[in-house]
Image (cartoon, rainbow, N blue to C red):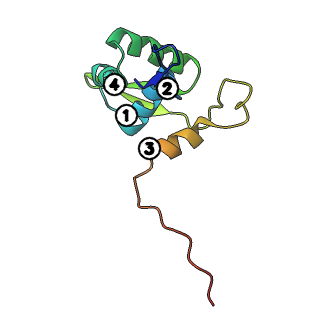
Amino acid sequence: MATTPRGSGSTRHWTFLTNHAHVLLAIARNPTARLRDVAHEVGVTERAAQAIVADLEAGGYLRRTRVGRRNEYTVNPDGHFRHPAEADRQVGDLLALFTADAAPRSTPAAPPS
């Protein structure tokens, strides 16, 4: 977690993305990951990861399929954000931002002279 110094000398812990977003991103990156591994990556307990996955399934953002002894997850990129300020956007936009291969960014070409 990130810490931010405060004027009183105390620190506040906060991040821009919620644990729900982190779990969704972890599963999008590795759809066959064990929840134990997802929990470790996100920094929550396995029980918290299970509860978050249940929330995401109930909300239609994830679908779980049993494959042998493991679960495989399918992310629904068409689901919309829940907060009214972003309700017009799909979670696929967030997934694309954070799961895309880290390709080097090119600088705009200079106009021909």
Contact flag, marks 3 and 4 (Cβ < 8 Å): no
Name the residue tied to disc 1: 31
Which of discs 1 and 2 lies nearer the camera? The answer is 2
Contact flag, marks 3 and 2 (Cβ < 8 Å): no
Quadrant assignment for the C terminus:
bottom right
Disc 1 to disc 2, C-alpha distance: 24 Å
Which of discs 3 and 1 lies nearer the camera? The answer is 3
Amino acid at pointer 1:
Pro
- Mark sitting on residue 38: 4
Residue appearing at x 70%, y 32% in the figure: 86
Residue appearing at x 40%, y 53% in the figure: 102
Q: Residues within 10 Å of mark 3 (few under 14, many from 20)?
A: some
Q: Secondary structure at mark 2?
A: loop
Disc 3 to disc 2, C-alpha distance: 18 Å
Rendering quarter of residue 50: top left
Residue appearing at x 39%, y 16% in the figure: 49
Contact flag, marks 3 and 1 (Cβ < 8 Å): no
Q: Residues within 10 Å of mark 2 (few under 14, many from 20)?
A: few
Q: Nearer the viewer, residue 102 or 74?
A: 102
N-terminal of the two: label 1 or label 4? 1
Amino acid at pointer 4:
Val
Name the residue tied to disc 2: 15
Task: Find residue 91 and report its horizontal and vertical position in percent.
Answer: 59, 35
N-terminal of the two: label 3 or label 1? 1
Disc 1 to disc 4, C-alpha distance: 10 Å
Residue 92 lies, with reference to residue 56, above or below; the image says: below
Disc 3 to disc 1, C-alpha distance: 12 Å
Residue appearing at x 47%, y 42% in the figure: 98
N-terminal of the two: label 1 or label 2? 2
- Mark sitting on residue 70: none
Quadrant assignment for the N terminus:
top left
